[in-house]
Image (tube, rainbow, N blue to C red):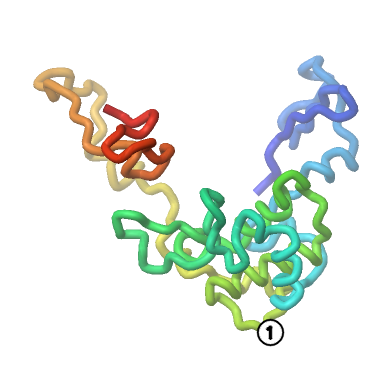
């Protein structure tokens, strides 16, 4: 799979990077991106490991790094602080009323974890971690979710062999075959539902602040 074309602003100049689709001269916009500019943006990681940097890190190293860089928001054990995301636990909750979507209970691929930590964390200091540090933090997160043992060392070489528990429940979009029978060039526009009924409220989903007094409606509740 070829890398996606990226448009980015570098040194105040708009630069378009194309992968065989066109050139800067053809569209009369910007200039061809330099190899080092493309490399700086081309940091995505695929599930098969393509895009991973050289490096390795252990669970023990990751625990120390996590406490220093991540625990303030995500908790010492990935349990989440306040409304910050929970990263560990939640196994068996996906079919419950309040599913806990964590790395171990929901995420499909380890590459998603690595890519996000590498690209966007720590909050407010993105891309300051070295590759070995990212490997170590990911190893610790895998350990918190009972995916690897406490003496595990994650590396570029063994990365593709690590499978997250919920991976089998993700599959390619098959609607073109499974739902084709429902497609209609002339959709029905009669006998529609007479009224729209609200079946849930934002407060139930815990996305609005707590009510000020007992019995008060939460601010922003859907009515």
Residue 104 as seen in the image, left or right of residue 13: left
Q: In the image shown, does 202 or 56 lie closer to the viewer?
A: 202
21 sits to left or right of 85:
right
Q: Given the current orientation, which residue lies at the most extreme top position?
A: 28
Q: Residue furthest left?
A: 191
Secondary element at tag 1 = loop
Residue name at image x 71 percent, y 74 percent: 154
Q: Residue, x 64% and y 82% (percent of image)?
A: 150
Q: Position of residue 47 (x, y in %)?
A: 61, 60
Question: Image height check: is 63 above or below 218?
Answer: below
- Coordinates of residue 149 in the picture (x, y in percent): 61, 83
Residue 169 visible somewhere in the drawing = yes
Q: Residue at x 80, y 57 (%)?
A: 129
Where is residue 30 shown, x and y percent of the image? 84, 20
Residue 156 in sight here: no
The front one of 180 and 120 is 120
Residue 10 in the image: above or below residue 167? above
Residue occupying image coordinates x 72% and y 78%: 60
Image quadrant in which the C terminus is located: top left
Q: Residues within 10 Å of mark 1 (few under 14, many from 20)?
A: few
List the residue tagged with mark 1: 151
Q: Is residue 95 above or below residue 205?
A: below
Residue nearer the viewer, 168 or 175: 168
């Amino acid at each position: 799979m070829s890398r996606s074309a990226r448009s980015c602003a570098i040194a105040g100049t708009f630069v378009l990077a194309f992968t065989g689709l066109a050139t800067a001269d053809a569209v009369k916009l910007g200039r061809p991106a330099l190899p080092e500019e493309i490399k700086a943006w081309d940091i995505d990681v695929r599930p098969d490991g393509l895009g991973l940097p050289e490096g390795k890190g252990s669970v023990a190293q990751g625990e120390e790094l996590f406490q220093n860089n991540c625990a303030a928001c995500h908790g010492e054990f990935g349990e989440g602080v306040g409304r910050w995301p929970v990263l560990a636990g939640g196994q068996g909750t996906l079919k419950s009323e309040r599913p806990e979507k964590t790395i171990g209970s929901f995420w499909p691929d380890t590459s998603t974890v690595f890519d996000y930590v590498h690209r966007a964390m720590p909050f407010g200091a993105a891309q300051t971690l070295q590759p070995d540090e990212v490997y170590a933090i990911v190893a610790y997160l895998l350990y918190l979710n009972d995916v690897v043992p406490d003496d595990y060392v994650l590396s570029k070489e063994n990365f593709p062999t690590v499978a997250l528990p919920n991976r089998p429940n993700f599959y390619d979009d098959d609607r073109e075959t499974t739902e084709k029978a429902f497609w209609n060039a002339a959709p029905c526009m009669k006998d529609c539902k007479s009224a729209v009924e609200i079946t849930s409220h934002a407060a139930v989903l815990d996305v609005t602040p707590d009510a000020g007094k007992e019995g008060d409606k939460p601010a922003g509740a859907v009515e």
